[in-house]
Image: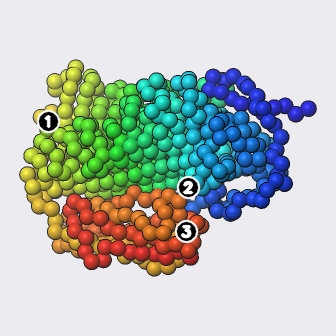
Amino acid sequence: MSHPPVRRTPEGRSVTSGLTRRAMFGHGAGLATIGLLGSIASPQAVAAPPRRVAIPPRSEDVVYASDFGYDPTDSTATLQAALDADASTVVIDDPGGTWLTGPLYVNRDGVSIIVAPGVVVRALPGGYPEQRMCLLNIIGRTGVSVIGYGATMIMNKAEYGHDGQWRHVINIMSGRSVLIEGLRLAESGGDGIYVGKSQVPGDPHHSADIVVRNVTCDANYRQGMSIVGVAGLLAEGCRFSNTLGHNPQAGVDIEPNDADQPLTGIVLRDCVLEGNQSYQMVVSLTRYDATSPALDILLDRCRLGGADGQERDLPVFLYNGSASGTLSGRVEIRDSLLQAGPYAGCWGSWNQDGVDLVLTRTVCQSWEQPASGYPALSIRAFDPVPYVGGVRFTGVGVYRNVAEPALTFITRGAVSPDLGVHDVHGSLTVVNPEGAVVDLGPDATDITLTIHERTQVPDTVVGISAAVEALLARQPIRLTVERQSSDLSAPLAVRYRVAGQAVERQDVYGTPGVVVIPAGESSATVRVRTLPTAAGASVTFTLEPDLGYTVGPEGEATVTIS
């Protein structure tokens, strides 16, 4: 005798689904093929474009949600029945209206969920009375993919008010080999995506091998994405924006709940974090101690902040340590732009604790701010700590135009009066008409920091060109951004916009919209991967004016994809 599938709630209780049979696959024709399904792989194995296949037609191994019915007022039972069906692929197709649903649960391993283009899955109004109810729950599961290019999963943030901070759109707890791709996740009562551990006895203490690709997390309540415990996470081509509601109010927050939760193999690549109320990204380790595992976090080719974004007097990127002085690992920002809005700073380290903090070929812009604004780069001590410092700068540029330190040390609270910055090395190029100022205090030790001062912004003209003007879908677009200047001493961040018939994060991979030309170099390369849906479209890359350059006559490049 077959048993109804078990649905696992966050509290570990078991309930049964009302429908257990596969959809009657003979009903209707399959949807048009749209090439949306991606492979599941560990972050270390996803350098190549994912495997793309068409949405399959109905079969004994493929079910369509609409075959289980559609209730425009409440489709919770319908969608849950489709998820519980004995099929490896579940297609949430277009029923001719919005799917309104209460919390949904993935109750089995090895399932692919495809949300068709244009489909909206919305949280049922009044359907989330408990603070920890989430729209889609992946708890203790392995090999789950959720792909939805051109689709939206959205909650009702205004309805929840200030009642809790845990109503997430996608809730991954103790998940293994989970892929989230192509979706827009918006207006939660918590996070767009939460990655952490399950409360179910026997489940692993953290998630592992998570891939988030070409996803937009917009206008969520607490975070675009929270990472609480994971061994291996890649977020590529994503946008985390407009978080507003409950602190930290960040684009991405990496913050463990327990001392033994790992934060390893975490990579954000080609991502945009902008318009979030407090920080664009924060790494907060206040619950870590001497027993905690070593950190391994990398931001690669990302853009954080923007002139119209964060206005609070906080850094765009913040590392908040444990104050124990006993942690280890590495947090690096590489080939990225940190752009402070009014009153905000670019980068901050609070209560350093032994972790190496590294900035490589990165540009920090803190321009046209009041003198009372947050320092561009800051090292702070709030609590009694053994030391502060542990920072490495390699080819970093700071653009600032107020008579305030580009890099400063600040103490606050019960800190030893003779505490000094320790172990700061590398090179900074500071472009500041008011002069470059670094203030690390009178008690600094083990400092080998070279400051290259520039009182004028170099006169630079930039252009863009494509390696080829036509290529096949799935082939990468290669662009060269070049600067014409006699002064190449400072790294330069050049902004660009993606437009044309091909849609970013649907037909081509998401980009950071910026490329950093390293100090001493006249050009840099942009590589953008294309998706099968881009066939027959063109995509245009247009340089946008910004600090440190003007756009020359070759300010646009168009590529046709066939």
- Contact check, label 2 and label 3, Cβ < 8 Å: no
SS at circle 3: helix
| Residue 267 visible somewhere in the drawing | no
Gap between marks 1 and 2 measured at Cα: 52 Å
Please give the residue where the numbered disc 1 appears in the rendered image: 441
Label ID, residue 150: 2
Quarter of the picture holding the C terminus:
bottom right
Residue at image mark 3: 534
Instruction: Where is residue 123? Give x, y as percent.
Output: 57, 36
Report whether 334 appears left or right of 461: right
Quadrant of the image for the N terminus? Answer: top right
Front disc: 1 or 2: 2
> Residue type at mark 3?
Ala
Marks 1 and 2 close (CB-CB < 8 Å)? no
Please identify, in this view, whether the residue under mark 2 or under mark 3 is nearer the observer: 2
Q: Is residue 380 above or below residue 149?
A: above
Does residue 367 lie above or below 2 as drawn?
Answer: below
